[in-house]
Image (tube, grey):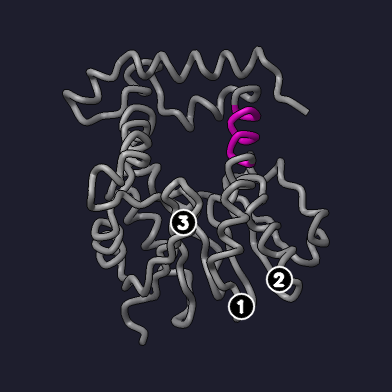
Amino acid sequence: MGLPSAPISRLRSVHWQSWSHLLHSVQTGQHAFDHAHGTGVFDYLREDAELSAIFNATMTTSSARLATALLKHYDFHGIGRIVDIGGGHGFTLTTILANHPTMQGVLFDLPDVVAGASLEAIGGTKRCEIIGGSFFETVPADADAYILKQIIHDWDDDQSLAILRNVRAAMPGHARVLLIERRIEPDHRDAMRVLHIDMEMLVNVSGMERTDAEYRSLLEQAGFRLARVVPLLDGAGFAVFEAMRSDTN
């Protein structure tokens, strides 16, 4: 079933209004969305249920494309309990759980977001717990792995560090953090597919796409060590940045 055309057109209009203030972002380094609309993009969506529904549906579609590559290229074996931080309506998490029948999951996002989650495909609440909250305050504790899919790129370094430090405070010593983000390749010709998304981040949110070195530095500042980078070979430049607490071997 297609999405209603009128709300999509309105969402596109809101989006391009912020792009009309690109010069503001270039001159100040600040995102133009706030300048154009008087509030940040996530607060704007929270106040508009219709546009928020379209946005969440779009994120689910994006997750569907990425989930196939994630399951193909990243090995989830050995993970007993996994938390999807900022997991939206739970598509990525439920896809992982459906392919790993003994794994337990926790879907964590803002209360109004997880209210739209559906877990029937993987056995409902017997397999997955839903928790509402803000990752700027605290995240669920005692999991083997924490997924943050396209979360860190939405925020500047200070905000990203706040999120990552909350994750570190919640996780046991053996746990791993999985940042699923696009990589900016060292060669700008190879990086073009991601650099235009970097501009999108500049204009519409306070975040950015990053290089491997920038993710490594960010993780180290938050008390992690980058264990490895697993390319997902999805054609969009995504990879899994797998990190452990820096006080563990």
Pinpoint residue 220: horizontal percent, then vertical percent: 27, 67
For mark 3, give the secondary structure: strand
Q: Using the rendered view, name the quadrant where residue 115 is placed.
A: top right
Q: Where 111 falls versus 202 (above or below)? A: below
Q: Give the CA separation, mark 1 to mark 3.
A: 17 Å
Q: Quadrant of the N terminus?
A: top right
Q: Using the rendered view, name the quadrant where residue 229 is placed.
A: bottom left
Look at the image and say whether residue 206 sits in the magenta stretch.
no
For mark 1, give the secondary structure: loop
Q: Residue at x 48, y 32 (%)?
A: 42
Pointer 1: residues within 10 angstroms few (<14), some, or many (20+)? few
Q: Using the rendered view, name the quadrant where residue 31 is placed.
A: top left
Name the residue tied to disc 3: 180
Name the residue tied to disc 2: 100
Look at the image and say whether residue 57 sits in the magenta stretch.
yes
Q: Residue at x 32, y 19 (%)?
A: 35
Name the residue tied to disc 1: 77
